[in-house]
Amino acid sequence: MRRYYIALILFISIAFLFSGCAGDDSTENQGDAHTPEGIVENAVFADLDGNEVNIQDFKGSLVLIDFWESWCGPCLQVFPAMEDLRQEYPDEFQVLAVTVGLNEGPEDARKFAEEHGYDFHFLYDEHEVFQRLGGQGIPFKAYVDPDGNFIKIEMGSYGREGDYNRAKELITEYFGE
């Protein structure tokens, strides 16, 4: 009998949680600090010297916010492809390589950045943007259009070529060939 009550309480709690989190998909929610759109469009990170970096500082470029850490094999596998896109589209495409803080801090990111020549903005997720977006694992990416508006989130990796092609499609969508 006790198991029945525990299961019932658990079921009611979960149902309440999901009904409380449901929202409409209307555009009037965009920009709300509690939606993915609002979280990404208002994201603030710290550079490796501790200075604040606002996502809106990159208006005019398609921005990839790439949440990563140096031990993440799939994250590192895609970095050369994103570097290729940076070289092809230096004014149109920006990569914010944001260390999540799961197992590493800014010093680990600094060491990685110094050892590799990637033309990325290496940042630290000091304000827990990753967690607020519901991130539970990496790779985890968010894209922002040239006007500073949220486009989409991608979880996982499609491999070097797949991630390259997906990002390039967005670049050409916004800037043409």
Image (cartoon, rainbow, N blue to C red):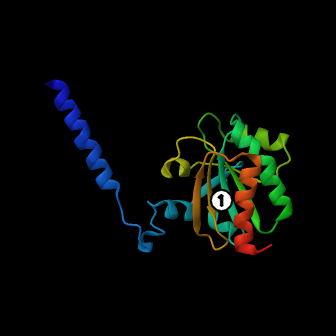
Image position, residue 70 (x, y; %)? 71, 37
The quadrant holding residue 108 is top right
Label 1: element kind: strand
Please give the residue where the numbered disc 1 appears in the rendered image: 53
Image position, residue 3 (x, y; %)? 20, 26
The front one of 166 and 41 is 166
Please rate how many residues cluster around mark 1, counting C-alpha atoms within 10 Å: few if below 14, some from 14 to 19, many from 20: some
Is 88 on the left-hand or right-hand side of 26?
right
Is 8 on the left-hand or right-hand side of 128?
left
> Residue at horizontal 64%, vertical 52%?
46
Image position, residue 32 (x, y; %)? 45, 66
Locate the C terminus and report the quarter of the image it occupies.
bottom right
Looking at numbered disc 1 in the image, what kind of residue is underneath it?
Val
The front one of 69 and 14 is 14
Image position, residue 114 (x, y; %)? 83, 42
Locate the N terminus and report the quarter of the image it occupies.
top left
Is residue 113 visible to us here?
A: yes
